[in-house]
Image (cartoon, rainbow, N blue to C red):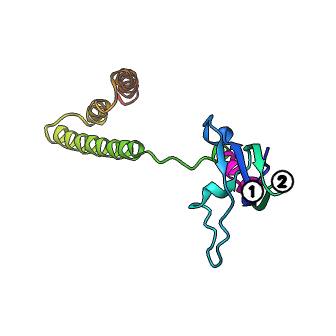
Amino acid sequence: MMECDAVLVEGTCVVNEAMLTGESIPVTKIPVPDEDGERFIYDLQRQHVVFGGTEVLQGKGQGDYCKAVVIRTGFMTTKGELVRAILFPPPLDFKFHSDFLKSIYVFLSLGLIGMSYSLWMWISNGVSERESNFRPLSIFLALFPLRDSINLSIIGKCLLTFASCCFL
């Protein structure tokens, strides 16, 4: 089992990358070509990298071993990136959540405008001030689902009864 990401310099390896990719077919890794002046680019030359967390099934090289240069260890390896992604997932920003909040603000503002208009109309038509304080609650209740509006209407009736008892 490889404990680090390493670039193969000499020899070839057959590795099982099932732990990282889920593929059950072993993958052959070849050494980096010995070309002067060319830089190794990790993302483009992955066929030369033996990843941490993979199992080396077979190696052929000069003598009894293959040579590789370690490039990453610990949480910086490919396996470490997977572990970090599980332990510290990136924050999720759902468009639905932001749109939902916008719609709540729209409905709330429409309800407040309707309550204000109704209150103004009731006062201008001569409804008593005590009754006009609790009637806009019925418009506000229309913004909530049925279950919540039933609960709030019971609370509203209790408040209306309390107000009529206290202010008579």
- Residue span colored magenta: 72-84
Q: Position of residue 104 (x, y in %)?
A: 35, 42
As helix, strand or loop, the secondary structure at mark 1 comes to: loop
> Distance from label 2 to label 1 (Cα)?
8 Å
Read off the residue under disc 1. Answer: 11
Q: Is residue 47 above or below residue 107?
A: below
Residue type at mark 2 is: Tyr
Quadrant including the N terminus: top right
Q: Is residue 95 magenta?
A: no
> What residue appears at the point 42 percent right and 43 percent down from the top-left corner?
97
Residue lying farthest to the left in this orientation: 125
| Residue at image coords 62%, 62% | 42
Q: Residue 72: percent from the left, percent from the top? A: 74, 59
Labelled disc at residue 65: 2
The quadrant in which residue 128 appears is top left
Main SS category, magenta section: helix
